[in-house]
Image (tube, rainbow, N blue to C red):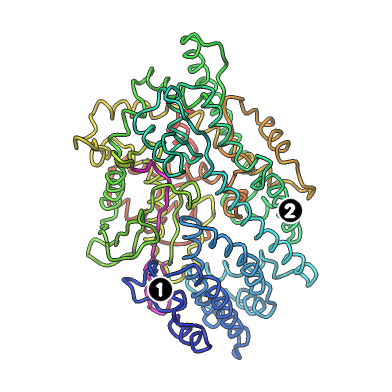
Amino acid sequence: MCLFTLIILIIGCGIQPENLLLQEWDTPFQTPPFDEIKNEHFMPAFIEAMKAEKAEVEAIVNHEEEPTFKNTIEALEKSGELLNRVSRVFGCLNGANTNDELQNISKEVAPLRTKHNDDISLNEKLFARIKQIYERKESLGLTPEQNILLENYFLRFVRSGANLNDEDKEKLRNINEELSNLYVKFRQNHLKQTNAIGLVIDKDEDLAGLPDEVVQAAAEMAKARGMEGKWVFTLQKPSFIPFLMNSEKRNLREIVFKAYINRGNNNDEFDNKKLISRIAALRISRANLLGYRNHADFVLERNMAKNPENVYKFLNDLWKPALKRSKMEVADMQAIINKEGHNFKLQAWDWWNYAEKVKKEKYNLDDAMLRPYFKMENVRKGAFNVAEKLYGIKFIIRNDIKVYHPDVEVFEVLEADGTHLGIFYSDYYPRDSKRSGAWSSSFRSQSNIDGNFITPLVYNVGNFAKPTVDKPSLMSIDEVETLFHELGHGLNSLFGNTTYSGSRRVPRDFVELPSQIMENWAKDPAVLKTYAFHYETGKPIPQELIDKLENSKQFNQGFMTVEYLAASFLDMDWHVLTDTTEQDALKFEKESMDKIGLISEIESRYQSTNFGHIFSSGGYSSGYYSYIWAAVLDADAFQAFRETDLFNKELAASFRKNVLSMGSNDVMAQYIKFRGYEPTVDALLKRRGLD
């Protein structure tokens, strides 16, 4: 049933046509009409969209003919289109431009969505049809892509409890419902704590060491918070990181740093300690019901790593050289502390500040030298140019497409011959209504069922340095890499070229390859000259600065690798638990960090109470290691370009075809088609100076 027919049926049943979420959108490329979508549209739309999908599933279940790929698997792939559309628009707004009303809807709809999904996944008659097709798949003459889709559906149902008895299915439903409510509560607590004020300054002398643009941004933040005449630093990275890097006030650095790491751990109404312990326990119970020792076994079964033992071995192999390197970095910083005549031992809140001093001493380079050359608009154009040179595509600004916030900009993406490829939204500045971090998602995925080619609507979200009254958005080099990273995810979505969007599922530990490989172009000397222009003079970044940046590319890699690996170990430790007894979260975390020997000068990149990757949903649970697993792949993949040509179009075409465009249940086979062999960690260790 097509979306248009479905909407007509819904309206015919009494749903008011003014609910834009239930109408065909007469907009360019059927993009969401954000100027007309209202908060009150969502709850009725969710209800009706779930009814519609339920009817579609019932039609499949009650089909009179014997189960076939077309009348069951393909029909399932087509079902839920309206619910998918409503969910994606809501998900974007609730993550990037939320408010109390949307958060209340999120609380209300979460258990309804969970029950709805369980009703489908635990439908015995539906699973019987899927299983019947799966068991005779060898005789059906399916295409490789159809085989992938069939396997994905079969395993999704099995892993969702389709084989359980009625009593265990009911237990599973209860676990899923409770988890969905806990995830919502964690997300909302996390947003509140991240948007909290970390520090208010009311004395000029406490601004010592801070660059003018940091002071100006803090003054504007204070004004926005009703404290004009003061300076406010929040726990968003564009606010507190420059403070940690530059402030001469060690006691204030400690206050800001501890406020950041203690998000979710303040024994107030937004405290997450009990939430995460309960989430971990419920995940064990669910895994046990499904026949697994623990949550990690359940998750990793469908990842490249396959099991926890392989993940731990991988992490431990990297931990030793990274920790050794970080201790050398500590010694360098302590030497500067001693040289300055101070009598204190380096602490975690000192790291950012003294790392900058080491960088300046060793390489005559600091963040303040680089920022003027990284105006956001220029960086984005530079990232676009890399994609254009590699793949021949074009980004064309579209001012006629509606957006959900004034900060959002929209581009049409075209193939080299002018064919429409998709729509790309960028939303890069922090605000209280946006969660922290950076991410890529879509309002619509690519598909081509029955020759109806659907193009994707993709968006990138970031929290980069915001423009001030007298300066544009000037980015740090880390923010530059993040912008390139998220565009890599966006390209992965834009380049989809499959019949079924459901066949493009790839393992979590492979999904970061398309994003991380783009980071390699961000700091390449030749590429920097094409987009790094001084925001005032328009002059390109001088070769002297490029050389300094190149010479310092392995700087602080011990710290960056150790803080990341610590979080990866913490994630795994939570999810290899087999005892459903709820843990003392702080005690558990301390034991986890003590076990690997994390030095006191470094904190894990995330603490349990603010580890949104693994506790705000199931997305990266038992999978945070994926970033560095994929880093092995991206270091090796980029080496292919290094060995030939940075913009080798033949290589780029192969990477697009074998990695970015297609789905596969054997992603290593796809990678080998591109590279010719399996990668090793050598290129990664060399790049980070850990060899």
> Label 1, label 2: how many angstroms apart (C-alpha)?
39 Å
Amino acid of disc 2: Ile
Amino acid of disc 1: Asn
Q: Magenta stretch containing residue 679, yes or no?
A: no
- Which residue corresponds to the image point at 61% horizontal and 34% vertical from the top-left? 316
Residue 636 seen in the current view: no
Q: Magenta stretch containing residue 465, yes or no?
A: yes
Q: Position of residue 336 (x, y in %)?
A: 46, 14
- Front residue (pair 542, 656): 542
Q: Which mark is residue 624?
A: none
Q: Which residues are magenta?
A: 446-467
Q: Is residue 632 left or right of residue 654?
A: right
Residue receiving disc 2: 284
Vertical order, 416 against 527 (above or below): below
Vertical order, 516 against 490 (above or below): above
Q: Position of residue 584 (x, y in %)?
A: 75, 41
Q: Residues within 10 Å of mark 1 (few under 14, many from 20)?
A: some
Q: Secondary structure at mark 1?
A: strand
Q: Secondary structure at mark 2?
A: helix
Residue receiving disc 1: 448
Kindly report which numbered mark, 1 or 2, lies closer to the viewer in this rendering. Answer: 2
- Front residue (pair 84, 79): 84
